[in-house]
């Protein structure tokens, strides 16, 4: 059975996470993804490298997590002959994707109008920090900037303290998801309607998309959301994170049905709450009672739960919750636990993957399955690993290929000396 995107050719001019993670998704689904790397290579190659320390063979953890299965073409992109190579590759491609700023791409002769004229069926896809229009369309962005501006940090942190950052690069990876979705949608649109398609999205926009309910709720109701520490800013009542006696934590959602609520109260030593008029219906415990529109009364239940959870170990709570399947709950895991989680392993969410300079490691795989088929995971490419094959396919002879690669290597040496 062919892979879902087998036969699709992608030229990726991207760095860091937001662009490369989207390109990796396409590669996982069977597309041929040619990663164009400048003289210094993708900067992620030099970040926390694994194993072999030679610069042109670095495999930093961020690079490994975003570039498996691609082909690497190493060029000096400050030289016009190299840019013409990129254009000639795009002539044969289905998709050109980049997270470079558009003014830079236009200056390089890689703007939409130029490439569309050369390839009338091209999917031209850009992702940036803040979107294609507006005063900050060309503003530079890192993950935290988009999350800060999008409001996520403002609702993250202790109720009596300042904003906090989540522990992962949510803005970049969310932007990558939207970018991959936009590209696949454009491929479908081309198949249905024909012609070139342009895709634009951003990390800032992805942050708004991830928080659409919370942002829309404030707009619709006028209810200003505030930081709530281990609780969700817009979900009152029993839902939250609760620390256990051994330093662990449990996520608990609504205790909806009465049987589960009574059983929980008895196990937790909270029998007095069973008939407490503040909490004696599911609606009251969820902050949905007519007289509690803001969830203030429902939130009065939290100190009782906090004390109860701290009196038993994580294992004790797990044992109880496994007997009440109606309750939504789970243990807060660290990354070591995630990497060996049997559910993640069973679904191929964590897979064994080879790293050219670091052996085989359990890494995060592609979480989408089509017809039950799981992707094959080739390793990420060494810098310039495919120069000879790709340039040869464009008609360059051995001497020209050697000269192009030598120019990239010389430019790298020169620029590294200036860092």
Image (cartoon, grey):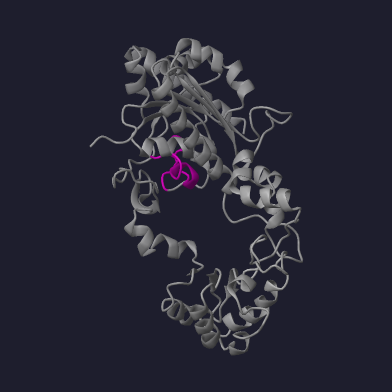
- Where residue 26 sits: x, y (%)? 40, 35
Question: What is the magenta range?
Answer: 51-69
Identity of the residue drawn at 61% across and 70% down? 283
- Where residue 188 sits: x, y (%)? 41, 28
Identity of the residue drawn at 46% across and 10% down? 118
- Whether 324 is among the magenta residues is no
Of 180 and 389, the residue lying toward us: 180
Of 330 and 387, the residue lying toward us: 330
- Whether 68 is among the magenta residues is yes
Which quadrant does the N terminus fall into? top left
Up-down relation of residue 284 to residue 132 (above or below): below
Up-down relation of residue 48 to residue 286 (above or below): above
Up-down relation of residue 391 to residue 147 (above or below): above
Which residue, as the protein is rendered here, is positioned at the far left? 1
- Where residue 168 sits: x, y (%)? 57, 53
Query: Could you tell whether 244 is left or right of 368 in the image?
Result: right
- Where residue 320 sits: x, y (%)? 45, 81
Query: Which of the 4 quarters of the picture holds residue 293?
Result: bottom right
Is residue 109 at all visible to an observer of this figure? no
> Magenta: predominant secondary structure element?
loop
Of 174 and 44, the residue lying toward us: 174
Query: Which of the 4 quarters of the picture holds residue 73?
Result: top left
Query: Could you tell whether 378 is left or right of 248 in the image?
Result: left
């Amino acid at each position: 059975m062919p892979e879902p995107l087998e036969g699709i050719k992608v030229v990726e001019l991207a760095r860091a996470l937001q662009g490369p993670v989207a390109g990796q998704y396409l590669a996982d689904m069977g597309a041929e993804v040619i990663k164009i790397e400048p003289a210094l290579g993708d900067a992620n190659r030099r970040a926390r490298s694994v194993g072999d320390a030679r610069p042109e063979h670095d495999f930093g953890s961020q690079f490994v997590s975003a570039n498996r299965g691609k082909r690497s073409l190493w060029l000096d992109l400050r030289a016009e002959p190299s840019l013409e190579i990129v254009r000639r590759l795009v002539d044969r491609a289905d998709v050109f994707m980049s997270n470079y700023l558009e003014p830079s791409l236009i200056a390089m002769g890689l703007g939409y109008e130029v490439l569309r004229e050369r390839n009338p069926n091209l999917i031209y896809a850009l992702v940036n920090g803040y979107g294609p229009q507006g005063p900050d369309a060309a503003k530079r962005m890192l993950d935290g900037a988009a999350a800060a501006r999008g409001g996520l940090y403002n609702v993250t942190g202790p109720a009596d303290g300042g904003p906090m950052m989540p522990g992962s690069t949510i803005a970049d990876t969310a932007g990558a998801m939207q970018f991959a979705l936009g590209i696949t949608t454009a491929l479908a649109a081309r198949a249905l309607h024909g012609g070139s398609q342009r895709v634009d999205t951003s990390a800032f926009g992805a942050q708004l998309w991830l928080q659409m309910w919370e942002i829309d709720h404030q707009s619709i109701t006028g209810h200003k959301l505030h930081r709530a520490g281990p609780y969700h800013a817009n979900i009152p009542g029993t839902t939250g994170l609760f620390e256990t006696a051994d330093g662990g934590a449990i996520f608990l959602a609504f205790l909806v049905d009465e049987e589960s609520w009574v059983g929980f109260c008895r196990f937790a030593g909270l029998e007095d709450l069973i008939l407490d008029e503040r909490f004696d219906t599911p609606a009251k415990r969820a902050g949905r009672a007519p007289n509690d529109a803001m969830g203030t009364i429902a939130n009065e239940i939290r100190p009782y739960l906090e004390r109860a959870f701290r009196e038993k170990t994580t294992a004790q709570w797990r044992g109880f919750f496994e007997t009440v399947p109606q309750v939504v709950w789970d243990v807060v895991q660290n990354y070591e636990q995630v990497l060996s989680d049997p559910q993640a392993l069973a679904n191929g969410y964590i897979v064994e993957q080879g790293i050219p300079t670091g052996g085989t490691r359990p890494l995060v795989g592609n979480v989408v399955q089509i017809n039950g088929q799981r992707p094959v995971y080739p390793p990420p490419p060494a810098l310039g690993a495919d120069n000879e094959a790709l340039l040869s396919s464009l008609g360059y002879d051995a001497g020209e290929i050697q000269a192009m690669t030598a120019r990239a290597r010389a430019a790298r040496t020169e620029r590294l000396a200036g860092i």
